[in-house]
Amino acid sequence: MKKFITENGFEGYTYQEYLTIVQDIFKTALGDQSLDFNSNTAFGQIANIFTQFFLDQQTQLQDVYNLAFSRNNATGINLDLLGDLFRIPRKSGSYTQQEIVITTNTIVKLQGLDGNNANQVFTVGDGNGLNFVLVNSTFTKNGINNLLFQASEFGVINPAINTLTKIITIQSGVLLSNNPQPPLSVGALEETDAEYRIRQIKSTKINSSGFIASITARLNAIANLTNSIVLENFTDTTDARGLIPHSIQVIVEGGSDEDVANAIYNTKPPGTNMNGAEQFTIKQPSGVDFIAKFDRATTLTLYLQCNLKNNSGTVLDLIKIKQEFVKKVSFELNEPAASGRLTGLLVDTFEELGIANVFVSNLKISENNVNFLDLIPTPLFKNKWGLTEININIILI
């Protein structure tokens, strides 16, 4: 007789083995070893029903075992739940992001993924099924617009230069589409069951694996903490971001040093190194000091200039306009600054102030107030852009 839980894991019975067991029970109970169990007899049908019932129960028992104990046999959602139990989430898929040049002959409102109607998201492609969708809704300017798009499907998608030239969402005023540069980042497929299973099994051997979500959750629970990023380096060498081997880097905006340090102390895996210019010392029960390292977000100055044609018939209060505009502008850590998004926010400001017949054109942004561009990434993960009224130059034309 087999045992359900053995040194090899869960081992159950086959249908035929269950059927033999059920038939033997009937023969013993009725004291008749010659019972007829053909499928067209009453005993045969009853035996088959009981056999299927026991087999179904065994399948459910095996699912429970796989969920609770067996990384080797768990699949799909069971493997995900097992990973969550050990704080090792599956690596999700990501989308390729690409800057695409959209040429228009007028100001056009294009809906992005942040819009309300999923069927109207502005889309371009290569004509062979590879499509890219606009990330942020925007108002274009007349002429060349460098806008941020992402692939419509996640995975390793790397379009060739000058191939995304077909406009899928036909819209009046949009003339051309092109991708003269390689992608800003290439996406990845979701981690397969096989890859995820191997990483779970090896998780105790890899410093800090799977604890990022836990650290982030504790950080986000801190009062007055407005932003956070947790980076990790699993490798044995310093990576391209400057993270030392087997280490994490916590970047925060807001929150007290003590609260941030405690969040790291309570969730950081043992033996994991830390990066960061900030330090806070926590006295452990053993008396040994724990020195938490992290970085504070750095806000970079963004400069903005644009042309404004005033056909409203009234004198514009530019100070008021700038004040209301900057209230609408905010950036996340490591978020690039895009002129298209800012143009849309400025147009929205005019609408909210009840100002009609005012037209924005040639909105550009700069990190040095010299070279003005359409898109500026952040130099480092700990950077975020900040825009103030004094750095906005509105030129009336």
Image (tube, rainbow, N blue to C red):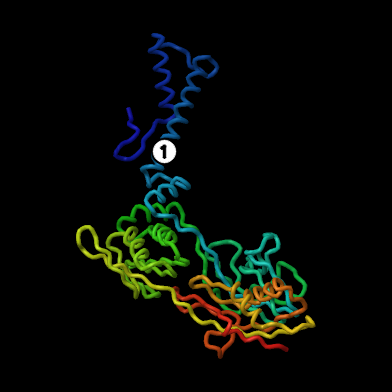
Task: Name the amino acid, label 1.
Answer: Val
In this rendering, position of residue 385 left or right of residue 129:
left
In the rendered view of the protein, which quadrant contains the C terminus? bottom right
- Residue 382 position, x and y percent, is 44, 74
Pick whichever, 66 or 258, lies toward us: 258
Dot 1: element = helix
In this rendering, position of residue 265 left or right of residue 61:
left
Q: Residue at x 53, y 84 (%)?
A: 367
In this rendering, position of residue 341 left or right of residue 167:
left
Residue, far left: 287
In the rendered view of the protein, which quadrant contains the N terminus? top left
- Residue 207 position, x and y percent, is 32, 61
Label 1 crowd bin: few (<14), some (14–19), many (20+), radius 10 Å: some
Snapshot quadrant of residue 25: top left
- Residue 287 position, x and y percent, is 20, 61
Residue receiving disc 1: 64
Q: Is residue 7 among what the camera can see?
A: yes
Q: Residue at x 39, y 17 (%)?
A: 24
Q: Which residue is drawn at 43% across and 69% down?
A: 254
Q: Which residue is drawn at 38% across and 33% down?
A: 12
Residue, far top: 31
